[in-house]
Image (spheres, rainbow, N blue to C red):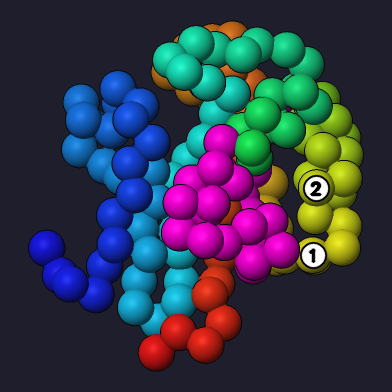
Amino acid sequence: MSDSVKRISSGAPWEEKFGYSRAVELSNGLVLVAGCTSVVNGQISAGSPYEQAVTSFEVAFEALKQVGLGREDVVRTRMYVTHARDTDEVGRAHKELFDDVRPVATMIIVSGFVDPSLVVEVEVEAYRAGAR
């Protein structure tokens, strides 16, 4: 592994099972956070699409916190939802969390996730200003 890449684990069982990191920080200041759902401590925190979106972003924020970054450092978000009817609720959660940050954002309708009770998954990218 390269010394210029820092890998962050959240301890989620899928990281070990599927061989990925929750987040990766690159030496150029970019931090990529893997897809996050409303799974907390191994349990699905089911709820409305709005609630799942908020929880999913909170999981991503926790990963950013491990490298000293926060919501205000996010420059890109991606939201994956299973139903077009849920886009307003997921968008509302995004606006509440990022209205003052204004990252670039994408929302995509997908066919489903590993557990059918999950209806939202999010990814975030953040940037550390002043990185080499």
In the figure, 75 relative to 57: above or below? below
Q: Position of residue 106 (x, y in %)?
A: 67, 54
Name which quarter of the figure residue 16 lies in: top left
Label 1 sits on a secondary structure element that is loop
Disc 1 marks a residue whose amino acid type is Val
Visible residue check, residue 129? yes
Visible residue check, residue 33? no
Q: Which mark is residue 64?
A: none
Most foreground residue, 79 or 94: 94
Q: Which residue is mark 1?
A: 101
Q: Is residue 66 left or right of residue 27?
A: right
Tell me which segment is drawn in magenta. 59-83
Name which quarter of the figure residue 82 lies in: top right
- Number of residues whose C-alpha sits closer than 10 Å to that of mark 1, classed few (under 14), some (14–19) or many (20 or more): few
- Residue at image position (80%, 47%) is 97
Q: Position of residue 112 (x, y in %)?
A: 53, 22
Q: Position of residue 102 (x, y in %)?
A: 80, 65
- Residue at image position (63%, 57%) is 70
Disc 2 marks a residue whose amino acid type is Leu
- Number of residues whose C-alpha sits closer than 10 Å to that of mark 2, classed few (under 14), some (14–19) or many (20 or more): some
- Say whether marks 1 and 2 touch (CB < 8 Å): yes
Does residue 5 belong to the magenta stretch? no
Q: Which residue is mark 2?
A: 97
In the figure, 34 relative to 119: above or below? below
